[in-house]
Amino acid sequence: MPETGKKVTKLIFLTDNDQDDLMLLHEAFLSLKQPFEIVEIASGEELMEKLSKMTERFPDFIFLDIAMPGIDGFKCLELIKNRINAPSLIKIIIYSGDSSELSIQKGFSLGADYYAVKPSRYEDLKNLVELVIENDWKSSETTDKVFHVR
């Protein structure tokens, strides 16, 4: 049981084969000045391998790019929701440059908790990570679960 008044460190997996996107997302989390443990993952295969070895503590959040070679983000999402022993505890955020309605619908139909279109401005990226971390996750409205800066 956590000590009273002590912040619990959130475990966050950032999965993207684009190193620049990983670095910017990581920096955006660090700007929140909260106790995060951030793990950068460069492929769907690496993500699935890490998750398969976990038995007690799972990530609180997985940011998952869909456009990755090998196992893409949609396939990872499907595998996580169907095979990992604690999928309901993990909040999965699709983090993609694809803003098509088809991809957004596919992400939610496979079990994504949130769909974020990669913003082009760093300030918008910081707003995104803050929204995700502070989200109460109780809204059933899909429109409340899409981040897209136009």
Image (cartoon, rainbow, N blue to C red):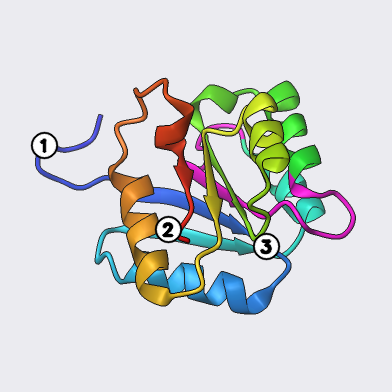
Does the CB distance between marks 1 and 3 fall below 8 Å? no
Report the side of 82 relative to 96 (left or right): right
Q: Which quarter of the rendering shows the N terminus?
A: top left
Q: Residue at x 52, y 50 (%)?
A: 116
Q: Amino acid at mark 3?
A: Asp
Q: Give whichever of discs 3 and 2 has the lower sequence position.
A: 3
For the record, the magenta segment spans 55-73
Front residue of 95/14: it is 95
Q: Which residue is mark 3?
A: 16
Residue 102 at x, y = what percent?
72, 38
Q: Residue at x 77, y 57 (%)?
A: 67
Residue ranking furthest to the bottom: 20
Q: Residue at x 71, y 33 (%)?
A: 106
Q: Mark 1, mark 3: which one is toward the viewer?
A: 3
Q: Give the spatial CA distance, label 1 vs label 2.
A: 20 Å
Q: Amino acid at mark 2?
A: Glu
Q: Is residue 88 above or below residue 6?
A: above
Q: Which residue is mark 2?
A: 37
Q: Which residue is mark 1?
A: 4
Front residue of 144/51: it is 144
Q: Give whichever of discs 1 and 3 has the lower sequence position.
A: 1
- Disc 1: CA contacts within 10 A as few (<14), some (14-19) or many (>=20): few
